[in-house]
Image: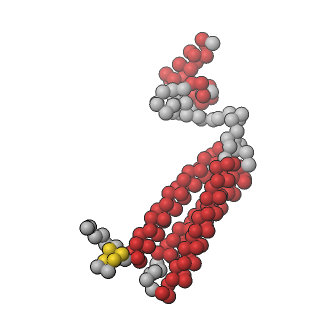
């Protein structure tokens, strides 16, 4: 039988196991914060162009979610400092664990509302839309003539678009 660092001669080292579990939870919080900041970037960009209804509400939810996630990360760090094999630390470790669990539930609820309320208004024109599909091909149907003046477009694409519009 292979013995890892958390296994001693007397059995499983509960404190080492708990600290590793807390560290894994911290990595999950970091991934969630990364996803939330990506959503924040989308909301800021689209909100500036007035394409998100309820922009202020969604921004409020996102900021609250990120702040609660940071608080969860801090509590996880504090929780990892407790030695669960020390009876004096049991009460504080359990309290930190309960707070983390409750705050994670709040983050989940906030993120459900965020996902429900991020709705792009498709009736408003897009500016500087990338007209390149996932496969790298140009998709002119989604582009407007003003988009073709974007610095990333080559003269060939502009000529092709003008040519296509003459055929119609």
Q: Quadrant of the N terminus?
A: bottom left
Q: Tell me if I can see residue 67 in this picture.
A: no
In the image, taking residue 16 as reference, residue 60 lies left or right, namely: right
Residue farthest to the top?
A: 167
Q: Residue at x 69, y 48 (%)?
A: 117
Q: Quadrant of the C terminus?
A: top right
Rendered image quadrant of residue 9: bottom left
> Foreground residue, 112 or 41?
112
Residue 155, position in %: x, y?
Answer: 50, 24
Residue farthest to the bottom?
A: 88
Residue 3, position in %: x, y?
Answer: 28, 70
Compared to residue 153, the image places residue 23 above or below, namely below
Q: Residue at x 60, y 47 (%)?
A: 42
Residue 57, position in %: x, y?
Answer: 72, 54
Q: Tell me if I can see residue 156 in this picture.
A: yes
Residue 102, position in %: x, y?
Answer: 61, 68
Q: Residue at x 55, y 83 (%)?
A: 91
Q: Residue at x 55, y 30 (%)?
A: 131
Q: How is the image coloured?
A: secondary structure
Compared to residue 96, the image places residue 143 above or below, namely above
> Foreground residue, 143 or 13?
13
Residue farthest to the left?
A: 1
Give the tally of numbered discs.
0
> Foreground residue, 39 or 32?
32
Compared to residue 81, the image places residue 1 above or below, namely above
Compared to residue 3, the image places residue 34 above or below, namely above
């Amino acid at each position: 039988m292979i013995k890892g660092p958390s296994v001693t001669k007397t059995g499983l080292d509960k404190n080492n196991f708990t600290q590793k579990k807390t560290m894994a939870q911290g990595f999950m919080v970091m991934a969630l914060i990364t996803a939330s900041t990506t959503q924040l970037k989308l909301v800021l960009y689209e909100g500036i162009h007035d394409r998100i209804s309820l922009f202020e509400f969604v921004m409020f939810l996102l900021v609250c979610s990120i702040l609660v996630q940071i608080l969860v990360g801090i509590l996880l760090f504090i929780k990892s400092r407790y030695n669960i094999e020390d009876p004096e630390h049991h009460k504080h470790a359990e309290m930190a664990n309960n707070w983390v669990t409750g705050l994670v539930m709040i983050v989940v609820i906030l993120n459900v509302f965020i996902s429900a309320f991020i709705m792009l208004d498709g009736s408003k024109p897009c500016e500087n839309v990338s007209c390149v599909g996932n496969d790298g091909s140009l998709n002119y149907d989604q582009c407007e003539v003003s988009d073709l003046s974007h610095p990333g477009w080559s003269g060939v694409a502009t000529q092709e678009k003008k040519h296509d519009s003459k055929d119609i």
